[in-house]
Image (cartoon, rainbow, N blue to C red):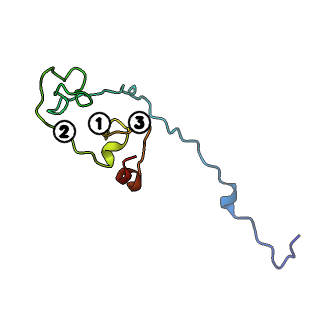
Amino acid sequence: MVCSGDWEPRQPQDFVRGVADKQAPPWTRPEQGDEFLFVCTPITTQGIADYGQADCARAGINYGLIPVCTMEGSIAMPPTAIAGCAIAGKLAPGLNDFLTGG
């Protein structure tokens, strides 16, 4: 209860109700499937174990190109892995792991 001196009428905005709004567009395109683009490079066309890539490598070809191992190249993830450098199961190597070789 409130004394008559402190009573105030209820705010009219308390009784306002929002109007439902549809957020979905009237039509959408189907989601596009994943596309993988494999590119042959001078390193992957060499017929050398650990560097030759399927459908790219040619027997007897050796340009003497060997990639330099980096911290990013030792991660076993397709965009950054370097053949001969990537360590299976390693997803985010620390600097100490790279410097000690393991």
Residue displayed at 34% across by 43% down: 74
Q: Tell me the quarter of the picture where residue 35 sits.
A: top left
* Closer to the camera in the image, 60 or 77: 60
* Residue in the picture at 28% in, 48% down: 70
Q: Amino acid at mark 2?
A: Ile
Query: Are discs 2 and 1 less than 8 Å apart at CB?
Result: yes
Q: Is residue 31 above or below residue 9?
A: above
Q: Tell me which residue sits at (40%, 55%) in the image.
A: 96
Vertical position of residue 27 compared to residue 12: above or below = above
Type of amino acid at the residue the image marks with label 3: Ala
Q: Which residue is mark 3?
A: 88
Is 44 displayed left or right of 3 in the figure? left
Rendered image: mark on residue 18:
none
Question: Observer-nearest residue: 56 or 5?
Answer: 56
Residue that badge 2 annotates: 66
Horizontal side, residue 63 vs residue 12: left or right: left
